Image (tube, rainbow, N blue to C red):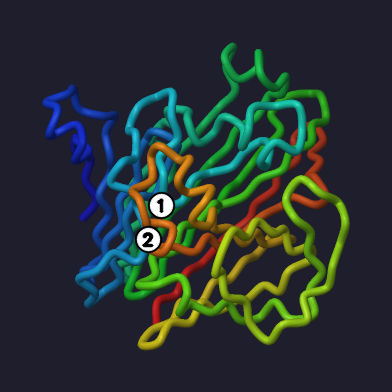
Amino acid sequence: MTELREFVAPAQRRAGAAVAPPVLTMRASDGATAEVHRHGAHVTSWRPMGDTEDRLYLSARSEFEGSAAIRGGVPVIFPQFAAEGPLPRHGFARTSLWSLGGIGRKSDGTAEVDFVLRDDPRTRAIWDASFKAVLAVSVIARQLAITLRVENVGETTFSFTAALHTYLRVRDVDQAQIHGLRGTLYRVSGDRTLVADDADHLVLHDYVDRVYVGAPSRLELRERDRAMIVEAEGFRDAVIWNPGHERAATLHDLEPGDEKRFVCIEAAAVQTPITLGAGRRWAGTQTLTAR
């Protein structure tokens, strides 16, 4: 079952404000669920089969309005990562209203949905490129897969960077470990100096904002009693982020102390931009498997 419905954020319910743009609820035949907003084609919830707790973090202070990005879930970063370029920070995809491309259920019970974003006068005023972007989301059992596809539908070559800025919910960031990055080169976001990670695992005790270049395709987030497998295909890099206490206090859409409740592990194409000639296509996928 997959359905469109109207969603009112908790803050909007309290204030009695108008409803936000529609959100689509996905439900696989085995009971696994996910929610995706048309605003940003933003996955905001994922509950694997048998789980009562969401495995994605979503801030209670998130703004569900056209001018703001939703804090948490899986923001779509396109066509620019962070402030590494002339465009607005993290591009415009995460604050754009995407069109519904299609919904359905496969024979094995997997729920699927596609959202589509095309260039228009607003996007061309920011980034002069003719493109079609599709975000495909599927959920089944204990797995969530998100694929970003980009096509050059014009006659002029363009380049872009992209990421799936995934906020994974943890019980305590100080007790969560990221495994699989040892030996990988990384740099601090905004800097080009590369350093090798020689640690057996990474713990985000404070602010971390790293771009791992040529990252392994499989990483693992471990907690005391559970784990998350994070796999990427088509994305060459990985970004690890947490604002830490001091920077989190400056984020108006983050509850005090909530920096302890998530780890961002992002499938990314950042270090070397993707270049597409006329008629060319690119795709990248991030698959989450809850253990």
Q: Secondary structure at mark 2?
A: loop
**Is 275 left or right of 57, judged from the image as shown?**
right
Across and down, in percent, residue 7 comes to: 20, 37
Compared to residue 219, the image places residue 251 above or below, namely: above
Quarter of the rendering occupied by the C terminus: bottom left
Q: Is 59 in front, or is 265? A: 59
Q: Which residue is found at the position 66% from the left and 36% from the top?
A: 79
Q: Are marks 2 and 1 in contact (CB under 8 Å)?
A: yes
Across and down, in percent, residue 216 comes to: 71, 74
Q: Which mark is residue 56?
A: 2
Q: Is 203 in front, or is 66? A: 203
Identity, as a three-letter code, of the amino acid under mark 1:
Gly
| Residue matched to label 1 | 73
Q: Secondary structure at mark 1?
A: loop
Identity, as a three-letter code, of the amino acid under mark 2:
Leu
Q: Which residue is found at the position 63% from the left and 82% from the top?
A: 201
| Picture quadrant where residue 194 is located | bottom right
Q: Which residue is found at the position 62% from the left and 76% from the top?
A: 202
Across and down, in percent, residue 187 comes to: 79, 59
